[in-house]
Amino acid sequence: MIAGPWKIKKYVMTNSSDGFPLRRNAVANSAGIQSTDQSVVKSSNPLFVGSVEKAFTVLHVFSQSRKPLSLTDIVAKTGMGKSAVQRFCFTLVELGFLERDPDSRRMVPSARLLELSHTYLATNPVSSVAAPYLLQARESSGEAVNLALPMEQDVIYIARLSSSNSHIIHPIVGGRAPLFCTSSGRAWLSTQTDEQISAILDASDLRRLTPETLTDRDAILKRIGEVSHNGYATAWQECIVGELTIAAPIYGPGRIGVASVNICVTKPAWSEQQVIEELAPIVCRTANSISNALAN
Amino acid sequence: MIAGPWKIKKYVMTNSSDGFPLRRNAVANSAGIQSTDQSVVKSSNPLFVGSVEKAFTVLHVFSQSRKPLSLTDIVAKTGMGKSAVQRFCFTLVELGFLERDPDSRRMVPSARLLELSHTYLATNPVSSVAAPYLLQARESSGEAVNLALPMEQDVIYIARLSSSNSHIIHPIVGGRAPLFCTSSGRAWLSTQTDEQISAILDASDLRRLTPETLTDRDAILKRIGEVSHNGYATAWQECIVGELTIAAPIYGPGRIGVASVNICVTKPAWSEQQVIEELAPIVCRTANSISNALAN
DNA sequence: GTACATAGTATTATAATACAATACTTGTGT
DNA sequence: ACACAAGTATTGTATTATAATACTATGTAC
């Protein structure tokens, strides 16, 4: 799963007190459902520093409940002990990643968290290489254009250009959505082998997000299969009611699927037919341009 | 300094091995210069979990040197021991915040870091409240518009709308620049008392970033003082050569300066005179609209 | 205004976890 | 092919993180 050395041997947890809140493969997925495999022997390497995980567990809680949280809120939501929450909150406040309202004593995430995203964006070439093509796509379509990467059973959005006329900015960057029911996800899945696709769908919670969400495995596989012929993937209101999206896969060096670009419009203004006719050429062209740019 | 309870008593470090890499007030500033006050008695509370700080220290290293780093690189840049770096890198890879190229064994920040910025942006109302006005400002000016918050001696950019014609996306969100030499910084400073401004300038490293950077304290204070009369602050090529910026302060409830909006143009195309004549009204109107929106 | 309940804060003894040192293995360059 | 550097694994030690608990403040009901 995780590439390279640092072979993780099977270690049985030595402490009798019960397990950690969130393990790597138990990090809450996009719906916040935890699949903690507590029964399984924990593959915990002595190199693993548990305190770091706990700190991120505390931060993670805020992404689900998007409001100021008190200590007891966090205790409830993490399952960590009162003392532990106290210490990690103190530490995170001290480091400037959380802010405390001295009156309500509730905490909120601080803007310093953006520094971490900057660390990623400044290091990673993908978003800057893709930028001109994404802008071009937005120009041609006038609609919102997103760039997404696969992450576990989700896509994670790493760049967004809002539609020209929209007067809201969705803070979608850093957000996640399931691979199986998004056009971006299907576009990327289409670059994988059948075995890999199966494995991902097995691991996915094929949950209905809207009345239109496809949850039948075969139906989903069929939609993914069509991508190779069409060059684009679609999802009609499967994630958000009224949202029509179309996407195409981006290849890195070696024709490996690494990302996808999608365009996202809304129902009353657009029909499925229109999306395919007008936007498919744009997403495909954009994805190809980015793939070529990445090859160099 | 840090508001509210959790009174930090003076604790002398008990361990003989020498101190921590980065303390809160010693986090590297925008130029990467560390001002670790190692001599001073460390105000370390037993609630503080040092491992968390070390994890962020490792992540922070990547924002300075924007390329894949090996273990030994990180050892050199953090001053942490080899074992410690090994364990924190392992942990961060395991948690998915760093990625390792199995061949080169070098690590890079992962897109999962964006999840943390999402946690902030989804929770915090400022960026979403401000969005429509920022879009309007970009519309009127056709130029890049930024929203910034004060953080220690810097501003941190929390939203950016690129200029309509530009074909690059600066990954400026999450980036920092000194308060003293940016228009955004000066705009916010103008909302503070003379004592507070002095304290901040005292704590700032008045370093020359370009040949045009004002480093004379009185000259800087004069520029800040003018903001109250004009309603806007300016900085001409003080941070980046060729960059002209103009900003206005944003007030939260209680007329407290909380942020600033700025517009950013480049030298050959614009003159200082033009910026003031054409853009000052826009930044002022935008800042006022956002201030009003925040009041409700 | 007082008493009660709840939430937040401080303290401490305990031992588990993080630690540094070091041995070992793999890779790289000459 | 050899030597050197870099990365990885292991282990005993004790520092650090821990949970329990006592304490204090805050807010609410009567």
Image: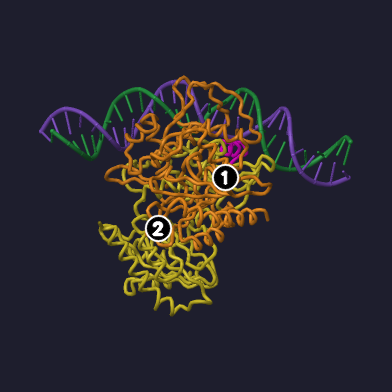
Chain colours: A yellow, B orange, C green, D purple
Viewer-proximal residue among A239 and A269: A269
Residues in magenta, as a range: A80-90
Q: Chain of mark 2?
A: A
What is the x, y in percent for residue B167? 37, 60
- Mark 2–mark 1 contact, CB under 8 Å? no
- The answer to which quarter of the image holds residue D7 is top left
Q: Nearer the viewer, residue B163 or A156?
A: B163
**Element on which disc 2 rests:** strand
Q: Residue at x 67, y 53 (%)?
A: B295
**Residue holding disc 2:** A150
Q: Which residue is mark 1?
A: B227
> From where the camera sits, is residue A65 visible?
no
Q: Can the viewer see residue A29 in this picture?
A: yes
Q: Amino acid at mark 1?
A: Val
Q: Is residue A155 left or right of residue D30?
A: left
In front: B55, or A136?
Answer: A136
Q: Is residue A85 magenta?
A: yes
